[in-house]
Amino acid sequence: MKHTPGKWEVTTDYQYIITNEVGIEIANTPLGQITKQNEANAHLIASAPELLKACKEALRPIEENRQGKMICEGELDEVWDLIKQAIAKAEGKE
C-alpha cells in the first residue's frame, strides 16, 4: 500500500484542509470547527509523510548497528535533523 506522495500542507477556509503539493485534498477537519485541537490534528496528519520518512531513516543506522557496523556521527546528525523537522511540522511549528 502506498500513500499519496509529496509534501502535505494545511490550509484553512471554514475548516482545516490537508492537501498535497499539487492541491489534491488528503483529509479535512469538520466544517466550521476551527479549534486549536482541530488545528493540531491537521498539522499531525499533514506531517505523516515526513514522520514516515524520518522513522525509516532512523531505522537504517539502528539496523547497521545491530549488524555490528560502525555508524558515522554525520549519519546520526542527518537522521537527528530529519526527525526534529518532522516533529516540528507535526506540532505546527514549521
Image (cartoon, rainbow, N blue to C red):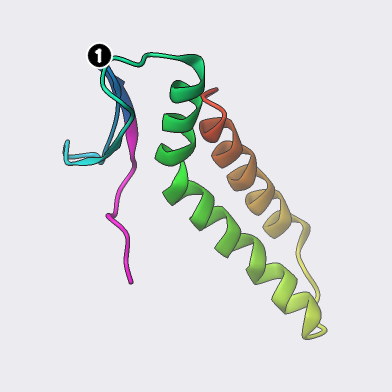
Horizontal and vertical percent for residue 40? 50, 26
Q: Is residue 81 left or right of residue 44?
A: right
Question: In this rendering, would 10 be left or right of 81?
Answer: left
Does 6 appear above or below 93? below
* Quarter of the N terminus within the rendering: bottom left
Which residue sits at x=33%, y=39%?
Answer: 8
Q: Secondary structure at mark 1?
A: loop
What range of the chain is rendered magenta?
1-9
What's the residue type where badge 1 is placed? Tyr
Quarter occupied by residue 93: top right
Which x, y percent locates residue 39?
44, 22
- The residue lying toward the viewer, choosing from 75 and 66, is 66
Q: Is residue 22 left or right of residue 81?
A: left
Please state if 20 lies on the left or on the right of 52 as rendered.
Answer: left
Task: Say how many tags the image has.
Answer: 1
The front one of 42 and 79 is 42
Residue at x-position 59% and y-position 58%: 55
Q: Does the image show residue 69?
A: no
Q: Quadrant of residue 88?
A: top right
Q: Report the residue marked by disc 1.
A: 14
**Does the segment drawn in magenta span residue 20?**
no
Q: Position of residue 16 (x, y in %)?
A: 32, 23
Residue at left offset 32%, top offset 67%: 2
In the figure, 94 relative to 64: above or below? above
Mainly helix, strand or loop, the magenta region?
Answer: loop
- In reply to whether residue 2 is colored magenta, the answer given is yes
Task: Say if residue 41 shows up in the picture.
Answer: yes
Residue 28, x across and y down, in percent: 29, 33
Mark 1 nearby-residue class (10 Å; few <14, some 14–19, many ≥20): few
Q: Quadrant of residue 62?
A: bottom right
